[in-house]
Image: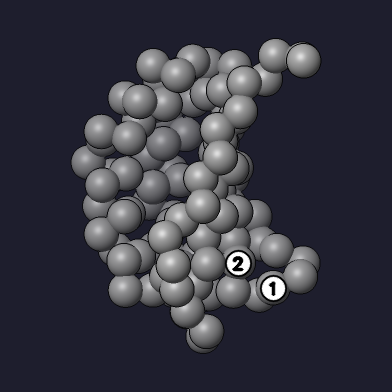
Amino acid sequence: MIIVAAAITGKPGKRDELISKSQDVIKSTRQEQGNISYELLASTEDENVLLMFEKWESKEALDTHMQTEHFKAFGAAIEDLVAKELEITIFSAEEV
């Protein structure tokens, strides 16, 4: 299993709009083959920071997701709402 943590730092005052713009990609992604879970979480320390927390069956499933129209549309929709590039970290769920 692959786990993805994608931190989204919004511009001040854009949190609700970011959450709204995320709903389509969340709904569509949860229906993708290979998706285990896809959640949007809010930081308890900074109201401008959201976290997209994802679980995938494989790296191939994640790679396919990143080529979907809904994923690309989400990136374009939030481009003017974010303060900086998303901070994306990908983990293997295997114990070390």
Position of the C terminus by quadrant: top right
* Residue 81 vertical placement versus 52 (above, below): below
Along the line of sight, the residue nearer the viewer: 31 or 1 = 1
Q: How much space separates mark 1 and mark 2, taking CA atoms?
A: 6 Å
Q: Is residue 33 visible?
A: no
Q: Is residue 47 visible?
A: yes
State the image coordinates of residue 75 (x, y, percent, origin top left): 31, 55
Along the line of sight, the residue nearer the viewer: 92 or 81 = 92
Residue 83 lies in quadrant: bottom left
Q: For this view, does 46 lie left or right of residue 70? A: right
Count neighbours of disc 2 (C-alpha within 10 A) and say few if under 14, some if 14 to 19, many if 20 or more: many
Asked whether disc 1 touches disc 2, contact meaning CB atoms under 8 Å apart, the reply is: yes
Q: Which mark is residue 49?
A: 2
Name the element at disc 2.
strand
Along the line of sight, the residue nearer the viewer: 14 or 87 = 87
Residue 76 lies in quadrant: bottom left
Residue type for callout 1? Asp
Residue at screen point 65% across, 55% down: 41
State the image coordinates of residue 38 (x, y, percent, origin top left): 54, 38
**What colouring does the structure picture have?**
one colour
Residue type for callout 2? Val
Q: Which residue is mark 1?
A: 46
